[in-house]
Amino acid sequence: MAEEQQNATANGANQPQVQFALQRIYVKDLSFESPKAPAVFQAQWNPQVNLDLNTRHNKLQDDIYEVVLSLSATVTNGAEEVTFIAEVQQAGIFAISGLDENSMRHTLGAFCPNILFPYAREAIDNLVSRGSFPPLMLAPVNFDALFAQAEQRRLAEAEQANA
């Protein structure tokens, strides 16, 4: 019996176990605007797409977090005329425990948004199609790279504040 406890301790059984569970995915906000319709349907189609992407999270209770991925696609026809704006805030509720601070930041800032992105991409595409425009198939996003860039900025700002 004593040997089993020693082996369990040696194998890290006393360390907190990482738990991750997706509880719910939902649309928090959804918007579509085509300010120049119906005139835009008669113009030559030369789209320019600008995509804004943002994530945020908040703690709902112990080990329960809401993560919100915001996508905003602004499409112009040529350089100046806004053809349409499609926006979605895709959210999820995640139960996460057993992670250290850095791992938790990475999970909330990259892993969870990676789960939400396909739902947000489909919502944007659906909105655009319902507006009678050609499909807007957004390319995959590397949330790990975006998170790494944000962490570098955060560390640089912390260094400047301490200097």
Image: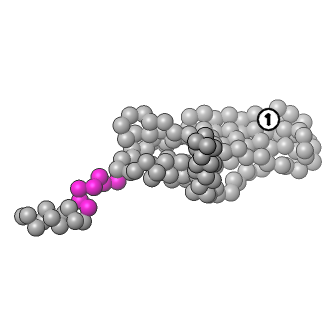
Task: Give the image quarter of residue 141.
Answer: bottom right
Q: How many numbered dots are placed on residues in this image? A: 1
In the rendered image, the quadrant that contains the N terminus is: bottom left
- Secondary structure type for disc 1: loop
Principal secondary structure, stretch drawn in magenta = loop
82 sits left or right of 118 in the view: right
**Is 97 part of what is drawn in magenta?**
no
Q: Residues within 10 Å of mark 1 (few under 14, many from 20)?
A: some
Quadrant location of the C terminus in the rendered image: top right
Depth check: 75 or 18 in front?
18
Residue 150: tell me if it is visible: no
* Residue plotted at (61% across, 40% down): 161
Viewer-proximal residue among 85 and 9? 9
What amino acid is at disc 1?
Ser
Q: Where residue 55 sits in the image (x, y, percent)?
A: 59, 43
Rendering coords of residue 63 (x, y %): 37, 41
> In this view of the protein, which residue sits in the foreground, 94 or 126?
94
Extreme residue toward the left, this view: 1
Q: Which residues are magenta?
A: 12-18
Q: Which residue is at 70% across, 44% downward?
A: 52
Question: From what the image shows, is residue 63 above or below residue 9?
Answer: above
For label 1, the residue is 34
